[in-house]
Image (cartoon, grey):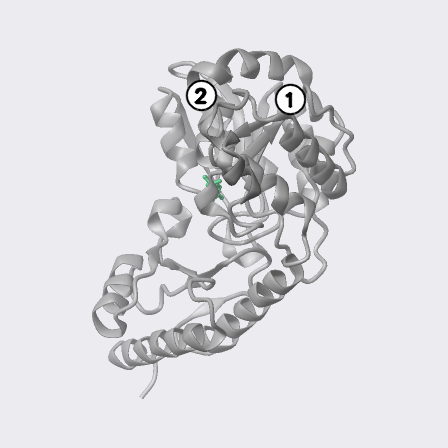
Amino acid sequence: MEAVKGGFPSHYTLPVGMYELRCALAEHIHERTGLAIDPSRNVIVTPGSDSGLLFAMMPFLEAGDEVLVPDPSYPSNYLNCKLLGAKAVHVPTWYDDNYRIHIEELEKRVTPHTKMVLLTHPNNPTTVVYRKDNLEELARFIVRHDLVLVCDQAFEDHIFDGIEFVSPCTLPGMWERTVTVCSLSKGYGLSGYRMAYLYADDHIMDVFYGGAVNVLGAPCTASTFGAIAALKDKTILPEYYERLDRRRRLAYEILGSAPGVKMRMSESGILSWLDVSALGTSQEVADYLMEHAKIMVNQGTPYGEQGAGFIRIVTACFAKDEDAVQRFERIKAAFTELARQKGLIT
Ligand SMILES: Cc1ncc(COP(=O)(O)O)c(C=O)c1O
């Protein structure tokens, strides 16, 4: 508010982001990963991480290139490849082993055209936080095939149950071939500010600096001041984190006990991911909830072939727990009725 009153936000900031914000981000990255990155070289502010993801991919891909994408995954991963004339190659992962990445599935799909792996970590929609040993295997695969990793860490700020979070760029051989894309949208609840950032090695940054002015323009100056304030004073975050933690437990308790539903407790963020295949297709179940519970959920299919039979629920939709609980109960009642119709219960 002080910055807005002072009038400065009506002017451009640097295309790569204001230096003071990049310093605050470098500190944040250091706290999270232990990396000591140079704020004047290795971090760029982007207007949200959706545009950051496309920006991160652009220098590396040409028409006909192939990109390996663990499936299920954030839909932008598939769409961004298409926008760049490249091909997203889906690599299946499975609910039963908590969506571990199987290196043999990646190996089967590597061709001379393969240039990149796109990883959403923690994953949207599954909420899975990939474990260190799995990421180490993935890193060895990426180095062996001389690929680039673009790692979307939009949900890295809310990881539950003390699960260790490893940023793949910190693994051996990965710093020089990884672009890490992050956001203040989820972790700080500031999606409307459109404040995100990416960080990478110097030689990658040279190309990004070249493209920043004509592709990104410059980040919003007013939001920049808001982001600096948010990064400097994190006192409200523990309460926010606790609320999200409570919310995923409530969702698990209520929705997980519905007949015909299989789900795990979310490992991160604001989502629940439900296997409803016993009740119908993703579309049938989503349509049924819309009609009978008057609640819109996401079908699993846009997240990839492995999303068939799943739905995604944004459990953080409401400010108050009781409002969310009321909706979870309504969804559960609709599931119960569907299960009755399917003959799963009497
Ligand atoms: C996994 C993931 N990455 C990136 C984004 C983009 O977020 P933003 O553009 O607000 O930073 C989202 C938004 O839902 C997301 O779920």
**Disc 1 residue type?**
Arg
How packed mark 2 is, by other alpha carbons closer than 10 Å (few <14, some 14-19, many 20 or more), is: some
Residue on which disc 1 sits? 177
Ligand 1 is within 8 Å of the C-beta of the residue at disc 1: no
At a point 46% along the width and 64% down the height, the residue shown is 315
Tell me if 106 is positioned left or right of 86 in this view.
Answer: right
User: Percent from the top left, x then y, of residue 57?
Assistant: 49, 23
Q: Which residue is more in the foreground, 95 or 216? A: 216
Q: Residue furthest front?
A: 6
Relative to residue 253, is residue 50 depicted above or below? above
Q: Closer to the camera: disc 1 or disc 2?
A: 2
Give residue 174's quadrant in the image: top right
Residue 49's x, y, as percent? 49, 36
Residue 314 position (above or below residue 16): below
- Residue 298 location (% of width, % of height): 34, 56
Cα–Cα span, label 1 and label 2: 25 Å
Q: Residue 278 location, x and y as percent? A: 35, 68
Q: Is residue 238 left or right of residue 149?
A: right
- The number of discs equals 2
Residue 333 is marked as none
Is residue 329 among the parts visible in the rendering? Answer: yes
Q: Earlier in the sequence, mark 1 or mark 2?
A: 1
Where, by quadrant of the figure, is residue 208 drawn? Answer: top right
Quarter residue 322 falls in = bottom left
Q: Nearer the viewer, residue 104 or 34?
A: 34
**Residue beneath label 2, please?**
217
The amino acid type found where label 2 is placed reads: Gly
Q: Are marks 1 and 2 in contact (CB under 8 Å)?
A: no
Q: Element type at marker 1?
A: helix
Neighbour tally class for label 1: few under 14, some 14-19, many 20 plus, Cα within 10 Å:
many
Q: Residue at x 47, y 32 (%)?
A: 47
Q: Is residue 112 visible?
A: no
